[in-house]
Image (tube, grey):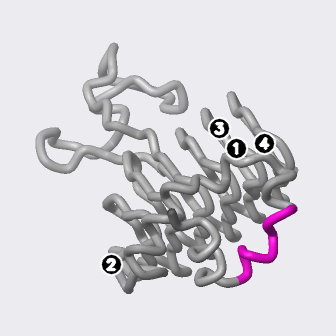
Amino acid sequence: MSKLFSTTFGKYNWIGNNVIIINSSIDDFSYISDGSVISETKMGKFCSIGPNVRIAPGKHPTHTFVSTHPAIYSNPEYCLKNFQTKDHHNPVRNVSIGNDVWICANVIIADGVNVGDGAIIGSNSVVTSDVEPYTIVGGIPARVIRKRFKEEQIDVLNKSKWWDRDIDWIEKNSSIFLNIDDFYKNLKS
C-alpha cells in the first residue's frame, strides 16, 4: 500500500503502510512509519520517522508572482492547463536528514531544510529552518527547546560517527549506548 518513486535504500530499513517516498535515499537502519510522505530527501542511518510526517511538501512563490497557482508560473504535468512553457519557480527542494534523527508524529519539514545528526523534532512541529546536531526542537514554527547532551558529549558523538561503524562494533559496544556518560567515557580521547 506504499508507493516508492526513484528511491534507494540501505540495509535493514522498513516502511509502514501508506507511505510515499519520492526522489529520496534512505540509509541503513532508518525507518518510516505509516502515512508519511517523503520527497527530495537524503536521510542518514538509524533515523526514526514517526507517522504522518511530511518532508519537502513543496513551496509556492509568495513575493514576486501575482498568483501562487502553479499553472501561472510553471508548467506542471498535473495541471490540465498551463500558462507557461517553462518553470519560473525553482525553489531548493532537497532536504538533508542526518544520522540518528528522531522525527515524531505529524511533523512537517519545509523544502531545503537540513536536520543535523542526533536531532529530535517534537510531534506536530513545522520545521522551516535548519536544526543543529543533537538539538531538540518543537512548535510552529519549530524553535530550539534544548540540547540533548553537554557540548563535550556532543563533540565525542560527532567525532565517533558511531553510525558508520560496522555492525560487529555496534553489537560489541551496545551496552555503552544505554547511557551517554558511559559512551562518553569509552570514546573520549
Mark 1, other Cα within 10 Å: few <14 / some 14–19 / many ≥20: many
Q: Label 4: which residue? A: 3
On residue 143, the disc is 2
> Whole-percent x and y of residue 171?
86, 61
* Residue stretch in magenta: 172-178
Numbered disc in front, either 4 or 2: 2
The residues bearing labels 4 and 3 have C-alpha atoms spaced at a distance of 14 Å
Task: Please report contact status of discs 1 and 4: CB closer than 8 Å, yes or no.
Answer: no
90 shown above or below 137: above
Mark 3, other Cα within 10 Å: few <14 / some 14–19 / many ≥20: some
Mark with earlier residue (2, 1): 1
> Whole-percent x and y of residue 107?
53, 70
Residue sitting at x 45%, y 78%:
136
Left or right position of 23 against 1: left
The residues bearing labels 1 and 4 have C-alpha atoms spaced at a distance of 18 Å
Mark with earlier residue (4, 3): 4
Q: Label 1: which residue? A: 27
Residue type marked 4: Lys
Q: Label 3: which residue? A: 25
Q: Verify whether residue 173 appears in magenta.
A: yes
> Whole-percent x and y of residue 78?
54, 32
